[in-house]
Image: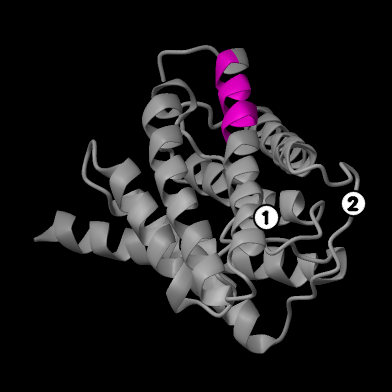
Amino acid sequence: MPHTLPKALLAEFAGTAMLLCVVIGSGIMAERLSAGNNGVALLANTLATVFALYVLIETLGPVSGAHFNPVVSVVLAVTGRSGHDRAHAVALFIAAQLTGAVLGAWLANAMFDMSVLQPSTKLRGGAGQWLAEAVATAGLMFVILRAPHGKAASLVACYIGAAYWFTASTSFANPAAVMGRMFSDSFAGIAPASALPFVLAQCAGGAAGAGLAWVFETKLASE
């Protein structure tokens, strides 16, 4: 990674903030314009997220790797694929991501004339949704680790867009996203009481996805 750690941290902070601003802001807009049609609202939310994710990865990837996700930062450090793999650097990445996620939620709330400080009341839970988060995060890590050079932005954006629809949880796949969404009582929100099981499922899924990617890498290397 050619850039310094401070620049990388700024990129992670700004990128995660913008990602959560897009996710929550598009959710609020979609909810207001869809006249109660949740399918239309989810489609609008999906498209905005996919486009923004691609742009953010392309523009900030050269600076920080465009993780925007604590699970991604940890897995890339453990597998030696991160430019900053020391424990303190990973901790700083995670702090930047979580702080950025909260700021992004506040910014989205403010833009739509909603109370900036608001906890979500949208409960999300149950075995199906927890399994969905594990599957979503496993797939995300697999795509990141197996993406050909120069293709990660498009593949990650496409995968997340698909996972919005094939997972019961609409694919948070990111503890920072959980953190930000707790601060918006909107279509995209998640109640604080629902957060911990989501994060635990994401961590388990991230490990599973990394393990599957390692199996394929080892197999290919031996052939």
Pointer 1 residue = 28
Who is closer to the viewer here, 24 or 176? 24
Q: What's the amino acid at mark 2? A: Gln
| Magenta portion: prevailing SS class | helix
* Left or right: residue 102 compared with residue 137: right
Who is closer to the viewer here, 37 or 165? 37
User: What is the total number of numbered labels drawn onto the structure image?
Assistant: 2
* Quadrant assignment for the N terminus: top left
- The location of residue 199, given as percent across then percent down, is 69, 63
Q: Please rate how many residues cluster around mark 2, counting C-alpha atoms within 10 Å: few if below 14, some from 14 to 19, many from 20.
A: some
Vertical comparison of 158 with 55: above or below: below
Q: Please give the label number shown on residue 118.
A: 2
Vertical comparison of 59 with 184: above or below: above
Vertical comparison of 7 with 16: above or below: above
Q: CA distance from mark 1 to mark 2?
A: 14 Å
The stretch in magenta equals 7-15
State the residue at coordinates (38%, 67%): 162
